[in-house]
Amino acid sequence: MNASSRPVHSRRQFLSLTALAASASLAGSLSGAAPSILPSRKKRPTLNVAVIGTSGRAQNTIRDLLQIESVEIVALCDVDPARLARGVELSVEKFPKARRYADYRQAFEKERELNAVVITTPDHMHAPISLLAMSRGLHVFCEKPLSRTIAEARWMQVSAQRSGVMTQMGTQSSSAHTTRRAVELIQAGVIGQVREAHIWTDRSARLPNQPASSEPPPGMAWDTWLGVHAPRPYSSHLHPFRWRWWEEFGCGPLGDMGCHLTNVAYRALDLSAPSEIDVSISDPAAPGLFPASARFDYRFPNRGRLAPMTLSWYEGGRTPDSALIDSLGIARQFGKVPSNNKIIIGDKGILYSDLYVKLNGEERFNGITKHPACIAVPESLPRNAEQGTLGHYREWVDACLGQGTPFASFDLAAGQTEMVLLGTVAAKVGRKIRWDAKTLSVLGEPTAEAMIRPTYREGFTLSSAELRSLSS
């Protein structure tokens, strides 16, 4: 079964599961009673949302949520008072009563009418907060990548299935009609059997030239920012943004852009379980950072009727060989090749940038809405009335209120995150790895265990026993 066609909960299953989740929280959670999943739709068809992380990417999130009439922001949470103030400034006119928190655990404890959370924190806290929220029956929207480690992604998938809550990962392009159309065209065989794909980004693990400051912003709850991570001193090379490039907190350029740029290939070609990942990396700018540039070659065996294939990922200024680009006629037709893009090559033709198709023997690419071979393929995936980021949030909100299903639910997003994060494991190991998806292990590399299954500091998410239950 292809990733894009995995089964989802029916409305009846959703109601029964969420009623069960609301009746009792998991043992060891911070409060003895879980909040109700939703108010009665007859009385108040509104989703009460807490936004955890209120600056940076969250600024756009708040702007989108303000446009959805069925959303009420009841809580805003950020460890940094200055960043919290930015979220308040955006939302206060429409939601002046939204309460403010520095600690998400206090928000979960006190907001008895809370239905859902939107999580835009650093990567190392995506899974801990999501798992705690789902244990309380809360719907979850979590930014990409779903987690920092592979085991966490599996835990999140299992927790979502058991609780029955509605989930969505922040791959906002999932709501674009062109994304869904590209998936349909590949699955319909327009470009034939795919044996290679090339995806690249200009993102690079880097640090500023100035020395790091050891003084946190005034009033910042640094220990809460660290969360499940072991205590360590504050550094401005971590907060507010550069945590992304550090192995212990982020997922590097792959985590930053991988879930976006691999979206069509992953969905259309069932790329959840590569057999091996080869890697070529440069030295990092500092110990503990991801490499400054890298190439990863993901190799996939047969997947049902799908042929073996290689997906090559390039970052930090690396790109596919210029001879390949020239042979495909991309630069000749489109000029300068964008610094973030993708090519999917089949035995009948090529899909470029998710937008253009050129079949064998054709001189030029044609748009996927105009190419005759594409026009002949019927639509099979649902389309949102709205596209882009607003459409992605609205799709999740509607699902939380019992209307439709999310296109990037954790059931799918966990597998995509797992595929992406295998590259980060290969980067840390520093050489080719062989992957066993069933046992969640890198064959012959016992040192990779700690890269796959994290060790948590207690008190910031589910108990150790509850986490073990998600692995069973």
Image: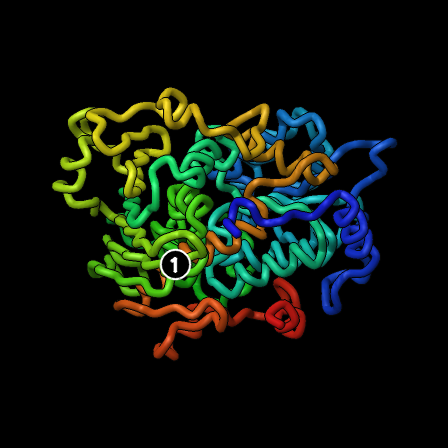
Relative horizontal placement of residue 373, taking residue 164 as reference (left or right): left
Q: Position of residue 109 (x, y in %)?
A: 74, 54
Residue 297: name its quadrant: bottom left
Q: Label 1 sits on what residue type?
A: Asn
Q: Position of residue 371 (x, y in %)?
A: 35, 23
Residue annotated with mark 1: 302
Q: Quadrant of the C terminus?
A: bottom right
Q: Which sits in the foreground, 360 or 461?
A: 360
Relative horizontal placement of residue 263, taking residue 432 as reference (left or right): right
Q: Is residue 403 visible?
A: yes
Relative horizontal placement of residue 178, taking residue 158 as reference (left or right): left
Q: Residues within 10 Å of mark 1 (few under 14, many from 20)?
A: few
Instruction: Tell me: residue 452, above or below residue 138.
Output: below
Q: Residue at x 50, y 37 (%)?
A: 174
Instruction: Tell me: residue 94, above or below residue 471.
Output: above
Instruction: Tell me: residue 307, above or below residue 71.
Output: below
Q: Which sits in the foreground, 308 or 18?
A: 308
State the residue lying farthest toward the top: 370
Q: Residue at x 43, y 63 (%)?
A: 233
Q: Residue at x 69, y 48 (%)?
A: 9
Q: Residue at x 18, y 38 (%)?
A: 325
Q: Position of residue 269 (x, y in %)?
A: 42, 48
Q: Position of residue 346 (x, y in %)?
A: 30, 42
Please tell me whether mark 1 sits on a helix, a strand or a loop: loop
Q: Is residue 219 visible?
A: no
Relative horizontal placement of residue 189, taking residue 68 as reference (left or right): left
Q: Count how many numbered circles sit on residues in the image.
A: 1
Q: Which sits in the foreground, 334 or 152?
A: 334
Q: Which sits in the foreground, 66 or 270?
A: 270
